[in-house]
Image (cartoon, grey):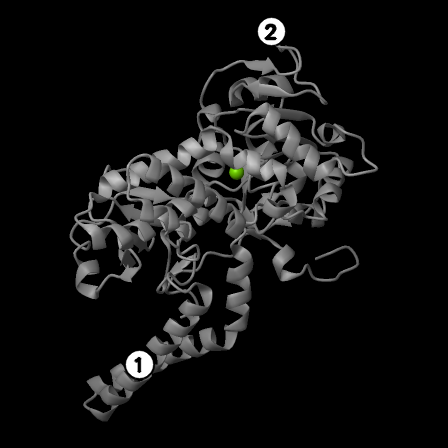
Amino acid sequence: MRPGGAPTPLLDRVFCCRSLRFDQVELVGFDMDYTLAAYRQPEMDRLAAEATLRRLVEAGYPPELARVGCPYDFPIRGLLVDVAEGNVLKMDRYRYVKMGYHGTRQLTRAERQRYEGRRPRLGSDRYRWVDTLYSLPDVAVYVAAIDLLEQLGPVDHAQLWEDVRVSADVAHRDGEVYRAVLADVDRYVARDPQLLAALEGLRRAGKRTFLLTNSGAATTERLMAALFDDAPRPRGAWRELFDVVVTEAAKPAWFVGQRAFADVDQPGRPVEHLEPGRLYRGGSRAEFERLVGVGGPHVLYVGDHIYGDVLRANVESGWRTCMIIQELVDELVADRAHAADLRRIDSLDAEVVELHEAARAARPCSAERARELEAERDGLEAKVDRSHHPYWGSLFRAGTELSMFGAQVEKYAWLYTTKASNLGAYSPYHFFRSPRVRLAHDGA
Ligand SMILES: [Mg+2]
């Protein structure tokens, strides 16, 4: 609810997995990349993929690869790459493979069923979990390369994945990607006109704020200045938006390590306090909590990476977490557009159950009618899936279950929303209340 009683628009809402009293939060922290800086995914994908492909060709792959067309609309978060077979998979929360592709060819039912006896484990050598928006272009390059290279001869799928990953990492590490972003910020970053007011509003409401990013100090300075230091705000004014700014944090190790903080502006100066207006490097969560005097449930950390930002913050330190999921915009729009189809699927399910009961009571025509309704339901489910994503369907669901990604959001994020500024729309006393847990027997 907005002040004045108007309901918060759907795309501005903060959704709640676990109840949280906002008035108990004293400190609100933000990640930078894909959290405060909302990158335009198609532009970033193209930039990263082209840099990766160039490096693969330099490393000895066929020159045709530099010109290959990548399916940028193929990858989503929450996919699993089976590097032994060269397959890309989507699992439900129980690790059942619900869909899969080899290159851009969809796996047959028989190919998928081969995973049933040995359900993939996220941590095993054979599988790579795709959980950051940074790694989406790697998957687009991987499937395009498989399609092309398999026409030319046998392919070592595991080696190919490692080569794609190394090439992509080098492009990020040597600064090629950031240089392009900083040279044309508006091409790569979607400015959020509400963000400045949201950050200022949190502090007016009595909360302290901090920035905690893995990016380097120089990059952070330039990107934040580009986002916030528009006229008439003076250069460097962005630093005043935060009580503490930590760069080169090395999350997720930051949450468990014991590193000291370094002062970026005065190297070598011992850090005995974390002061507003200064830039720090490194440090650790334990040292941070000691110096600011706040920790555990009184900290809310806002980030986009389930492992680096959300899981570690929550599991290791008891910090409350808010996950930024920019794909949620498309998901909510598709859900709303197909609300009638989703209701029809539910009612078809109920009718089918009744018809099966009738068939058991020796009314054989019921079984035939049930098959017709099941075919209608399957058709509707496929239509709804395609509207969510052309290759994978919903990000959060897999069939009637949560997808593995959806399950991780539910498990580790206290809150989730489409963009960081949405927090600014809520009163500092807001009670984020989780939906009542429902089991199959509820409402029976
Ligand atoms: Mg990030």
Q: Earlier in the sequence, mark 1 or mark 2?
A: 2
**Image side of residue 155 versus residue 327, left or right:** left
Provide the secondary structure element on which disc 1 rests. Answer: helix
Quadrant of the image occupied by residue 411: top left
Q: Position of residue 270 (x, y in %)?
A: 61, 7
Which amino acid type is shown beneath numbered disc 1?
Ala
Residue lying at 69% horizontally and 20% vertically, measured from the top left: 278
Res 94 seen here:
no
Res 371 seen here:
yes
Quadrant of the image occupied by residue 171: top left
Q: Nearer the viewer, residue 362 or 345?
A: 345
Q: Nearer the viewer, residue 267 or 241?
A: 267
Which amino acid type is shown beneath numbered disc 2?
Gly
Quadrant of the image occupied by residue 394: bottom left
Residue lying at 44% horizontally and 79% vertically, measured from the top left: 344
**Image side of residue 343 versus residue 90, left or right:** right
Tell me, for residue 268, which label it has, or none: 2
Q: Quadrant of the N terminus?
A: bottom right
* Residue matched to label 1: 375
- Disc 1 under 8 Å from ligand 1? The reply is no
Provide the secondary structure element on which disc 2 rests. Answer: loop
Q: Position of residue 69 (x, y in %)?
A: 39, 55
Q: Are marks 1 and 2 in contact (CB under 8 Å)?
A: no
Mark 1 or 2: the one toward you: 2
**Image side of residue 380 versus residue 61, left or right:** right
Vertical comparison of 14 with 32: above or below: below
Q: Badge 1, how many Cα within 10 Å: few under 14, some, many 20+?
A: few
Q: State the residue lying farthest toward the front.
A: 63
Q: Position of residue 237 (x, y in %)?
A: 76, 30
Q: Quadrant of the C terminus?
A: bottom left
Q: Nearer the viewer, residue 63 or 11?
A: 63
Q: Badge 2, how many Cα within 10 Å: few under 14, some, many 20+?
A: few
